[in-house]
Amino acid sequence: MSDNEKKSEKKSGDKRHIIGAGVPRIDGPDKLSGRANYAADNLPSNLAYGYGVFSTVASGKISKLSVDEARKMPGVIDIFHHGHFPTLYHTPSSFADGNKVEETRLPFEDERVYYEGQFVALVVADTFENARAAARRVKVTYSTDKAVANLDQGVEANGTQAGSGNHDRGDAPSAFDGAATTIDATYRTPVETHNPMEMHASTAWWDNGDLTIFDASQGVVVARNALSKIFAMPPERITVHAPYIGSGFGGKLWTWPHAIATAAASRELGRPVQVVVPRQQMFTTVGHRPETRQRLRLATDANGKLVSLRHEAINTTSYTDQYVETCGSVTKSLYSCPNLTVSHETTQVNRGTPTSMRAPGAAPGLFALESAIDEMALAVGADPVQFRLDNYAERDESKDLDFSSNHIVEATKQGAERFGWADRIPDIGSMKEGREIVGYGMAACNWEALKMACDARVSIRADGTAFASCATQDIGTGTYTIVAQAVSDVTGIALDKITVKLGDSSYPDGPVSGGSWATATTLPAIAGAARKALSEMKGYATGSNGAFSGASGDDLEVADGGLRNADGKQVSFADILAAGRYGSADGEAHTDGADSKYSYRSFGAHFVEVRWDPGISHLRVARVVSAIDVGKVINETTARNQVEGAVVMGIGMGLFEATEYDERNARPVNNDYAEYVVPVHADQPDVDVILLDYPDLAFNEYGARGIGEIGITGLAAAVANAVHHATGKRIRELPITLDKLMDDVPRAKTA
Amino acid sequence: MRHFDYARAGSAQQAVAAHGSDREVSFLAGGTTLLDLVKLDVMQPHKIVDINGVALDKIERLDDGRLRIGAMVTNTALARDQRVVDDYAVLSQALLAGASTQLRNKATTGGNVMQRVRCPYFRDGVSDCNKREPGSGCAAIGGVNRSVHAVLGTSDDCIASHPSDMCVAMIAIGATVEVQGPEGAREIDFADFHLLPGDTPAREHALEPGELITHVILDAPLEGSRSAYLKLRDRQSYQFALASSAVIVQMDGNTIREARVAMGGVGTKPWRAPEVEAALKGRPASEKLFAEAAKLAFENAIAYAHNGYKIPLGQQAIVRNLSDLTAA
């Protein structure tokens, strides 16, 4: 019997309803009551506090660093800097080998400064306040070089470097030249900063040469492996903990300089050290989504079918590392087009190393692509929905593979129906309500479905409860809960009798919580481990002293926290274990990453209504309908929450978010929660999420593809397209702030 | 944060005595500006006099019809006070448009009058800033100046906009600031309290060293008037005004008998627009009139690299507010 057949059989049984149910988060009470311990909540005895000294120039060298005054400040224990720091080592930073970091330069490695807000010293003192006070007294002078402050300056100063993820098929230039209708437009997206509520934080201590570190991390195993390389010590002697993190959005995927510095300082001082990254440095030293410039050239034939598509992107990266924002990752396969080119290049600027931010590549990339598709539809006189339906790819033409499961046509049609797209009057500015002009826009969304290798352990214990562990993390998305659901699904044990432990690198190796792959990766391993535990349990039950002695395990089914035979005899797990004096029935499982039989992707469509009040230049998103095809939904509540949250984040991307740098010196200017504008509750529109819920059983036994990122892809384009419908203005540079929509804005007098 | 001395005062007199005339001493009320800036090392008082124990938390109606507000009355309490809601709707609305609930619960009337600018170059502790480091220059001119920088009342030395919503309403209403100082008590016209930056942007207000705001007295409400505050910004809450207007109108049928107009977000101080008021006075209300009048407020406006949009946006804030207030 294949897994798929097993699965369909499972679905018929009552007890299987736990998969898909919108059960509340099992970690909710801990979070609400304050029992959930985040990285900076760990206060071991004799804890010392570190506070950074951060560079105030973006490019140059430290010419003098004086700690004399700071050293005399109350409570100061030590001050680390490039002239006083232990020798550490580079990690090869391999994704495949699981020791990746984003910023490969070690903290205090030399006197060079590559970006403003770089750690140039770490003051350690007896209290946080003393450390901060002393940090302000460390005197640093620099020999400053002219900073490269933005993408355009980077291209001019440094040119571009070839990136990765490129693709070429057919002959896009020739097809473009000979096409009936063409468009050629350039789109820009700014730096966006993750800004989770919880700032990056690390608490580290050493015990007989073993390192323990609580780090705000989306990947404890990779963090352990990277630290193993950096400290040149066996990974077995390092434990990374991240039981809870106050969200990450990709910013906490990899280990950043402060965590390395914290661990090193703790070793040097022989006592625990904690460092919390100040909010201002959340904009500098822990990654960001880079600035992009994307040129889109599209062409259609006389029937409105795409015949040529070029997506050429440049993104900013740091001087120390190349980070490629793969803006064209979706472009390769979303639409059918025989002649297609995707290229990625980078340019170096004086900013910290960028990193993945929710839907890396796809989020800025689909802003450009789905804006361009809208422009193309208008150019050929087609309805934007119909144009997409006419051009969606039926198979992945970039990989020459079928999609495992693709319901984008249904998602688009259902979304359009629910939204009321048919009521849209295409003429610009033609839909009015009171003082407001109503605009309707839509865009496709898309994300690759990924699955990594994973180990997991499940035990059914003497008291009838279950325990599951895996060194993945719950980054606020609901992983604890869906793991419990999977254990319950296999064992029949009720959720309130299941303990789930994640976020500890000593547990069986689990995946980084990123790429929307945690669900698809973790659940099959958990289920496999649970089945093995159940099998051991059945072995006990059918053994010589067992309650079902002599029976075959296949004849027993799980029921209400125990096993039951065909005659209705039922014995609890606790009794089965007690009868044999067994402490537990245990199982471990390993599952592999995704195969390459199919192209595995998730699909969907966003429909957005904007309201533009020209009398006060006020733009708002009034309504969003998102129809999402992510395979099987494991938990209706947390899944819907992921899409709703991503939609709100997408509204922020569309209307508000941009880290602004002073073009004279590369200094990030709006580096706090007041001036870096993200949506607040008052900006929240009505969001209607449709989850199609078609299991993708070729992908994994649950048919789940993951849901964390797809909701933000395409959303900003849908907003931009709706803005165009309302105002006639095609805004190709995010964010779409009110000043970009106003007419006759006075220009500054040039100095 | 640096170490500082801390004293607690039980009365205004005690507070003033504890303060002395030293400019490096700060009064602590709600702390929503002070503690923030001290932690950023932008303000470095060597002594803080906590005035949370002084009994300045009353709102009282004076015999002449004015409303006397204690300096320690919180923004929340003031916004919800029934006399304010009934007679000074513009003030209640302005207060509720500011900050967040938590901040309004802590922030005080006196503190709001004293709040510092949001210019990031002032707050970063590093950039050239004539407020923080007189003579160093103004990094905002020629820098990023879209959101919290002014187009009215700027100088070559400072272009930071005044951040308060409350003060915009107060300057429209008309008010008096009562202060207590080493030399005794005195009154300052609210319109004279905040200073233009000129070539001394570090000097932001008319207080002498050691003087403490004890009360703000609102002028008696304009008989039969209507008033409202309109705040325009990128997001709908928790952002300083890009442009705002406080408008009070007294109508006679469709004719504007009297109007008071002030603006926020666009000026280096809470900005009263008497030229707009004069243009409206005695004229029949119309969109055309409002637009013509609003334009007058910005005749001397200066656009910087990123904030030129505030010139039309500020006019829109006035026009829409007038339009809504004068609609039947």
Image (cartoon, rainbow, N blue to C red):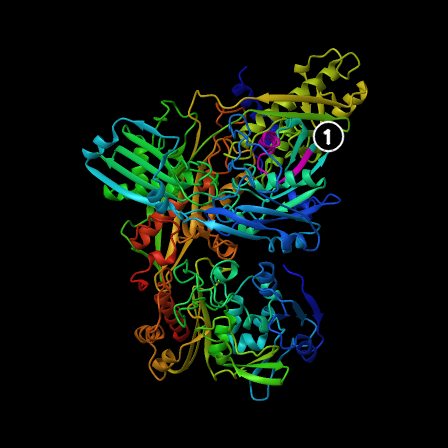
Amino acid found under the numbered disc labelled 1 = Thr
- Camera-side residue: A577 or A364? A364
Q: Is residue A218 magenta?
A: yes
Which of the 4 image quadrants contains residue B244?
bottom left
Residue A58 horizontal side relative to residue A292, left or right: right
Q: Residues within 10 Å of mark 1 (few under 14, many from 20)?
A: some
Chain letter for the residue marked with disc 1 in the picture: A
Residue A563 visible from this viewpoint: yes
Q: Is residue B34 magenta?
A: no
- Camera-side residue: A379 or A556? A379
What element does badge 1 sit on? loop
- Camera-side residue: A68 or A236? A68
Residues shaded magenta: A211-231
Q: Give the percent coordinates (x, y) of residue A285.
A: 52, 45
- Camera-side residue: B261 or A565? B261
Outermost residue, bottom side: B64
Residue of label 1: A465
Q: Give the percent coordinates (x, y) of residue A506.
A: 66, 29
Which of the 4 image quadrants contains residue A167?
top left
Q: State the quadrant of the N terminus of chain B.
A: bottom right
Q: State the quadrant of the C terminus of chain B.
A: bottom left
Residue depicted at x 41% and y 36%? A411
Which of the 4 image quadrants contains residue A533?
top right
Q: Give the percent coordinates (x, y) of residue B219.
A: 52, 83
Residue B182 horizontal side relative to residue B313, left or right: right
Residue A557 visible from this viewpoint: no
